[in-house]
Image (cartoon, rainbow, N blue to C red):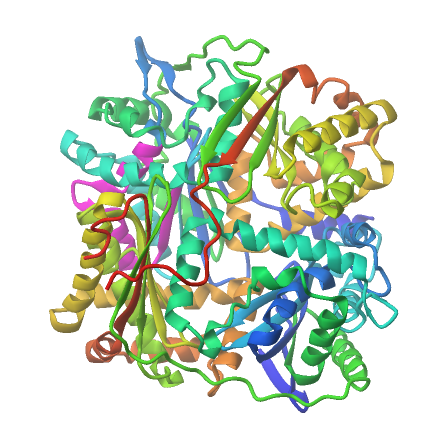
Amino acid sequence: MKRMEIAPGVHLSWDPAQKFNRCRVSIHFALPAKRETATAHALLPLVMERGYADCPDMTQLTKKLARLYGADLTVDARPMGANHNLCVSVTGIKDQFALEGEPLTQEYAELALGTAFHPYFVGETFDPEAVKIEKQMLKKALEDEVNEKRLYCQRQANREFFGDSPAGVRQEGYLEEVEGLTARQLTDAYYEMLRAASIELIVLGCGEAQTEAVKNALLEELSQVERAPAALAENMAMPRREPLYKTETFDTTQAKLCMLFTLGQPMQPRQLAAVRLAMALYGGSVTSRLFLNVRERDHLCYYCSSSFQSFTGSMAVNSGVEHADAARAEKAVLKELADLCDGPITDEELEDCRRSLLSGMTGLEDTLGGIETWYYMEVLRGGPIQSPDEARAALCAVTKEDVRAILRALTLSVSYCLTREEGSTHA
Amino acid sequence: MPEKQSVLEQTAADQWKVLPSGLTVIVRPMPGYSGTHVIYATRFGSIDRDFRLDDKEVHLPAGVAHFLEHKMFEDQDGDAFAKFAKTGANANAFTAFDRTCYLFTATEQLDESLDVLLEMVGKPYFTQQTIDKEQGIIGQEIKMYDDSADWRLITGLCECLYHSHPIRSDIAGTCESIATITPEMLYDCCKAFYAPNNMVLAAAGNTTMEQILAACERNGLMEPRPAERVQRLWRDEPMTLAAKEKTLRMPVAKPCFGLGFKEEPLPSGDLRSEMLYDLILCCICGGMSKLYRRLYDEGLTNPGFGGEVLRVDGCCCILFTGESDAPDTVRQLLLDEIARVRAEGVDREIFTLCKNEKYGQLIENLENVEDSASQMADFALAGQTVAQQITTLAGLKAEDADAALQQILCEERMATMYIQPDGTAVLPEDDGEEEEA
């Protein structure tokens, strides 16, 4: 992947990725998340994905994509710690597969740029009718959050964990604010994004001339915008605290447990290799302690896994447990962590985990999504951008003590349980 | 366009070989890729409950295929996951209604990983003790799916549509049904369905047919095997419904609903009709249809509302599922649209565009090693190749859809499933929750 700055706060990342059947053009907008505009930014992708100035009708846009052999246009917003990221992407088959010789790549670029820079306005704002419909969709999505118990439990735990910190802004939107949002407010949020966001144009699977054309078209669009890129929020970490134990009652068949830990200090990019190995060893792989001991040996849960979020220096352990076993599972999760911090770690288990991670890193450039995710996360994390090969080398150098240092720094902040009955749900 | 044909043929090409043991091997070398994805699949899934093996009749409780999949990872030497950990491969498995698949992705030590996979599936080992041990974990898995409204809609609809077909039962079974599993049952299943002539080995990525065949040789799959005499036993399934309607209460925020249409079972290997039904659904309620737009704009369903074809031996049904505050209105709108399209014919433009989308999807699925191997294995289990699928798709005409629509999606063979909120999934307040210390 080659990366270059093409304007202040605007970068182009490019990989010709010739082996793939498809190509992909994506434009990422990243900016610090703000509480007051969170709901507008959550609604923005839904309205933008419906259509744009040259193709305002949702059904016509779906037909246009079908005509391009089912090209995928996605406008996707997601939290990246205390930053908000909106990505407009178009992925489709390469020109060589077009049955009628259509110039597909050119159309993908026009679609992505049109969606990002020429939304469909009625007068000076987004179409109020489209805004009204998509507000209902956002409301529905927020109300339905509770249907997915695993996600719901994680989000509830996050809300307790982050509180009022910038990383605690609910980037999925605030239900009570949706109804009152206006087309004007949404338009203002859109212009704020164009003005303040760091922009990353990622072009994968296209030739040099095609990439140059997309780059120039983006610069042409940006020349119409008064840009003032805002500095992105740096990696953060929540301070340590006395653990908070919360229980919420649902009549589910299986209880859900989410435990959140803080590193206490922001993760430094140089720690990442040790973090990766620590997660694989603790709960991120089928050779991890949580999988082998809590699931396989003790049969306390169907799933029990850990994951680390580098932007917020936090670790989540999620599990699905018998209602009656929730307290035991919580205790077991803590015990496994303590055992790794203070007890023996065998060479065999460490190397098994390392081998699995190395293998995964070798294969991640086998998919367009893998390439894009890897490099864009490297960009957002700050620090020098590591290629997968460099990250592999760093991983090979990690020692048991490096792993222990990471795990020892993690302390429990929140334990959130969804269960049928109140009672001994926490250890 | 001969040049185009050549690009397509080259991209979709795979190498097939049927070994003396009966095993079908399919390989797609993918230059430039680091990883290889391998799938070892058997035509044995949750619906294979009753069969005759030689002269013995075997009747299985629900969930045996899935249980067997879990137990396959364990042998006398221990856990296969631990062996995969030594090769760095990322392994997994899944059970569907009509198949069980064991798979891994590897970037190094492919030979060693192939040996672990072929040996694990080829040398099963079960005892009552190891079976008892697995029941706890699988019980948890069953409970996890019990909390999934989407999954309960599918299983509920199947219970309404079918009197006796085993598709009525959950793939994982119930805690009670898996409690009756014995080692003998599992060995019978292995003998009947894990014979090489009932299996497919598909590999895509950084490998060659020679490498895969060498692994088969090392694991005794090049030698002829005596064919087991296996006969699947099916109970009669009338075309009537077991129930017209069913309602369930669950902790969901919004009501969910499903509509199921019972169709004539399709002959084995008839992927053309399945593809045609998919295109018809796309025309009736896909993203380009008038109906979808109306439901969306009026907020009558969630954006994910849509139809799918569920087809296995002895069973074919079309299921529509979604969330709605007004499921009966949606049902009526859907029925009206089906009647309109049946009378007027499918929209020619949308039909062609749906074909375009399917073509793009087939090309996309050839792009990465996982999708590529999965697609090859799926089609091979039905005796087809990816290239044949592309040809079949190209040959489908709107008139074929019009004709098929005269026979399918009939209201008298329709069942409805509702999931109503039980009242416990109220939306959370921001404050006022008790802290437990």
Q: State the residue at coordinates (66%, 40%).
A: B387
Q: Is residue A360 above or below residue B159?
A: below
Drawn side of residue B222 relative to residue B352, left or right: left
Drawn side of residue A151 relative to residue A274, left or right: right
Residue farthest to the front?
B432
Drawn side of residue B49 relative to residue A16, left or right: left
Instruction: Give the position of the C terminus of chain A as an image quadrant.
Output: bottom left
Q: Quadrant of residue A260?
A: bottom left
Drawn side of residue A67 relative to residue A425, left or right: right
Q: Is residue B343 above or below residue A8?
A: above
**Magenta-colored stretch includes residue B362:** no
Q: State the residue at coordinates (24%, 67%).
A: A351
**Where does the image place residue B419, in percent across and percent down from the top left?**
52, 33
Q: Nearer the viewer, residue B184 or B323?
A: B323
Q: State the residue at coordinates (51%, 52%).
A: A145
**Where does the image place residue B69, in percent across and percent down from the top left?**
33, 36
| Residue B117 shows up from this direction | yes
Q: Quadrant of residue A37?
A: bottom right
**Where does the image place residue B294, in percent across and percent down from the top left?**
77, 42
State which region is magenta: B66-93
